[in-house]
Amino acid sequence: MSTRKASLTEKQAKNGTSKYVLERCASINEYYDIAFKVMLLGDSAVGKTCLLVRFKDGAFLGGNFIATVGIDFRNKVVDVDNLKVKLQIWDTAGQERFRSVTHAYYRDAQALLLLYDITSKPSFDNIRAWLTEIHEHAQKDVVIMLLGNKSDMAAERVVKTEDGEKLAKEYGVPFMETSAKTGVNVDLAFHAIGKELKHRATQQPNEPKFQIHDYIESQKHKTGCCGP
Ligand SMILES: Nc1nc2c(ncn2[C@@H]2O[C@H](COP(=O)(O)OP(=O)(O)OP(=O)(O)O)[C@@H](O)[C@H]2O)c(=O)[nH]1
């Protein structure tokens, strides 16, 4: 068992969602048409593991925080325009001391979800450093999305939505606020990434380019997403 797998299982066991290993084995044989590697990045405790568990299992890892050790992945197949798109999602350790381990995984990732915590100014301020690191280690055409997580914690908010939007605009990346606790925007974030990657991989020359920003905006309005 890898160090990271043990860590994720440990997190889930502690929070009563320990069916992880069985589910993971079952999902290995799940049918798909096309697969992509997606990585979750951001400071320690911003909610990367919780976001992944919410998307994969629809559950929230509340309780004591257990930091991720190293790296591990989980698969989820999503339907995109009648195609089965497998997202292989890598959950990385946010702590500085694991940075050299995670760098090695950047290069073949097709998409990166970069998280900060809306209740932590340092985690937001570090986003520029993360983006510099990404530009050093990731593929030039990698899809990047900025996520302000823990949007349910309105009373503790220290990073305004507009500041997240402004930063994302400056770097030309899509942005949304998510909550791994309530599930707000979690599916939308991964589906938008799946759609963008699928379109990039299968697009015909005469087809209009998929506009991820427009897609996110239209879906947000449809689901009335943006409350906590
Ligand atoms: N209220 C609230 N708490 C959250 C949310 N997401 C994560 N948390 C909590 O924040 C803490 C850190 O979550 P993790 O998912 O373990 O953080 P991480 O980014 O994976 O941290 P590292 O493994 O150290 O990189 C835990 O106590 C979670 O319960 C959220 O959306 N809302």
Image (cartoon, grey):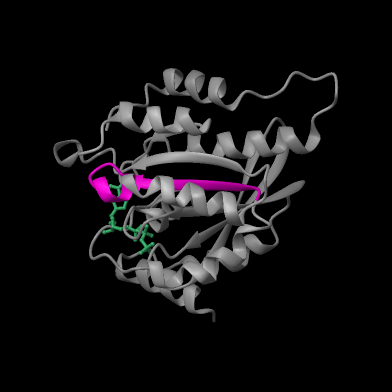
Residue drawn at point x = 46 percent, y = 47 percent: 114
Regarding ligand 1, which quadrant of the image does it lie in?
bottom left
Identify which residue, 103 or 208, lies in the foreground.
Answer: 103
**Which residue is the extreme one toward the bottom?**
1
Identify which residue, 22 or 55, lies in the foreground.
Answer: 55
Toward which corner of the image does residue 164 lie, by quadrant? top left
On the question of residue 38 being in view, the answer is yes
**Which residue is the extreme one toward the left?**
155
Identify which residue, 16 or 137, lies in the foreground.
Answer: 137
Residue drawn at point x = 75 percent, y = 18 percent: 208
Residue 76, above or below 208: below
Task: Give the residues drawn in magenta, as a range.
Answer: 110-124
Question: Is residue 119 highlighted in magenta?
Answer: yes
Residue 225 horizontal/vertical position (percent): 37, 26
Check the picture and name the quadrant holding the C terminus: top left
Residue 81 horizontal/vertical position (percent): 70, 30
Residue 43 horizontal/vertical position (percent): 37, 56
In the figure, is residue 160 to the left or right of 127?
left
Residue 87, above or below 4: above
Check the picture and name the quadrant holding the N terminus: bottom right
On the question of residue 9 being in view, the answer is no
In the figure, is residue 113 to the left or right of 28?
left
Question: Is residue 159 highlighted in magenta?
Answer: no
Residue drawn at point x = 46 percent, y = 27 percent: 169
Numbered disc total: 0
Toward which corner of the image does residue 17 lie, by quadrant? bottom left
Residue 91, above or below 51: below
Residue 75 horizontal/vertical position (percent): 60, 56
Residue drawn at point x = 49 percent, y = 60 percent: 91
